[in-house]
């Protein structure tokens, strides 16, 4: 009879494995939502600049669409990491996913811009697909959307590597003499992963601050008549102010999650016992 995987076995509430493994609530709900808000807030700052440059209010609808694109990318990443999906061709799946994003983005930008083409133009689009990229809303919106989508996948993978899984906890909780070295799981350097996330977050924060500074100027004269001296000062855009608050708040919460997962890994490898209350106190304090 084949033994069931560890994750499918019945785990008792007092099992020591639960002290170190990142719970499903954090991995499947909390972290995906925080990452989605983090990336969407950064995207909102960028499209706010585009709305000022091109004087098109339709840009301000793009963060709503970005929220769902980023969330889809995160949930797909978690789904592809499941052991049952190891036979799935990730590259082909991501390619198909990207094509769908491009098509849906094209329809969405037509919708918010009230610019659905006449039926007579569809033949031109089929003969020359580059015509689909002819408007600024779609071209720059799609370009920044893809960057946001890729960044969300990267951060999700980082947090997946940070989390302590069932196999890892089960191996290191065994006495040294009972461990089979052939079954030793791959160990990620979680300290470097925390530093990597921190650098990504701070880098995004610097870029967000740059966007906030640029948004205080009237950019239209710069891109129409190339007259720097005709630029005037505006107030800080409310969209960017909200984006900054959301970005740094969610970034701090994710940093707290990353540090906790790195500490769990350290305690596990040192054989230190962990109180059940630590996670609750940690999240409450953060």
Image (cartoon, rainbow, N blue to C red):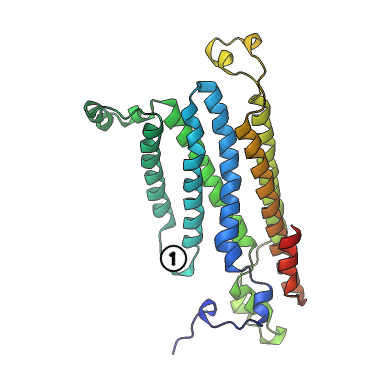
What residue do we see at 53% from left, 42% from top? 148
- Where residue 194 appears, as percent x and y from the top left, is 70, 55
Q: Tell me if 129 is positioned left or right of 230 in this view.
A: left
Residue at image point 56% right, 60% down: 29
- Tell me the quarter of the picture where residue 27 sits: bottom right
The residue that mark 1 highlights is: 85
Examine the rendering and report whether any part of residue 155 can be seen: no
278 horizontally vs 136: left or right: right
In terms of secondary structure, where does tag 1 sit? helix
Q: Give the quadrant of residue 248.
A: top right
Q: Could you tell me residue 172's position as x and y percent?
A: 68, 77
Q: Which quadrant of the figure contains the N terminus?
A: bottom left
Q: Between residues 221 and 80, which one lies in front from this camera angle?
A: 221
- Give residue 195's position: percent from left, percent from top: 72, 52
Residue at (28, 30) in percent of width and height: 125
Q: Quadrant of residue 206?
A: top right
Location of the C terminus by quadrant is: bottom right
Residue at the far bottom in the pictured view: 1
Left or right? Give the position of 154 relative to 120: right
Q: Nearer the viewer, residue 266 or 61?
A: 61
Q: Tell me where residue 69 appears, x and y as whole percent.
A: 47, 46
Count of numbered circles in the view? 1
Residue 286 visible from this viewpoint:
yes
Neighbourhood count class around disc 1 (C-alpha, 10 Å): few under 14, some 14–19, many 20 upward: few
Name the one closer to the observer, 33 or 158.
33
């Amino acid at each position: 009879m084949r033994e069931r995987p560890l994750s499918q076995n019945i785990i008792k509430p007092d099992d020591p494995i639960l002290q170190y493994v990142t719970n499903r609530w954090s991995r499947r709900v909390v972290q995906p939502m925080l990452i989605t808000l983090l990336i969407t807030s950064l995207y909102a700052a960028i499209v706010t600049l585009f709305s000022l440059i091109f004087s098109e209010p339709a840009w301000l609808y793009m963060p709503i669409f970005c929220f769902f694109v980023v969330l889809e990318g995160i949930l797909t990443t978690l789904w592809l990491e499941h052991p049952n999906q190891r036979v799935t061709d990730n590259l082909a799946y991501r390619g198909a996913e990207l094509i769908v994003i491009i098509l849906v983005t094209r329809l969405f930008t037509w919708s918010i811009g009230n610019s659905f083409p006449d039926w007579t133009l569809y033949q031109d689009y089929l003969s020359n697909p580059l015509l689909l990229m002819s408007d600024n809303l779609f071209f720059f919106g799609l370009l920044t959307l893809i960057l946001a989508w890729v960044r969300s996948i990267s951060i999700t993978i980082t947090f997946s590597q940070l989390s302590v899984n069932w196999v890892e906890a089960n191996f290191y909780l065994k006495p040294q003499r009972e461990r089979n070295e052939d079954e030793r799981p791959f160990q990620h350097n979680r300290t470097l992963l925390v530093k990597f996330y921190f650098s990504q977050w701070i880098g995004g924060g610097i870029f967000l601050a740059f966007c906030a500074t640029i948004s205080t100027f009237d950019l239209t004269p710069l891109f129409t008549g190339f007259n720097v001296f005709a630029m005037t000062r505006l107030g800080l855009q409310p969209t960017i102010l909200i984006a900054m608050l959301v970005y740094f708040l969610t970034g701090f919460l994710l940093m707290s999650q990353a540090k906790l997962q790195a500490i769990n890994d350290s305690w596990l490898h040192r054989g230190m016992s962990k109180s059940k209350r630590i996670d609750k106190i940690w999240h409450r304090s953060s």
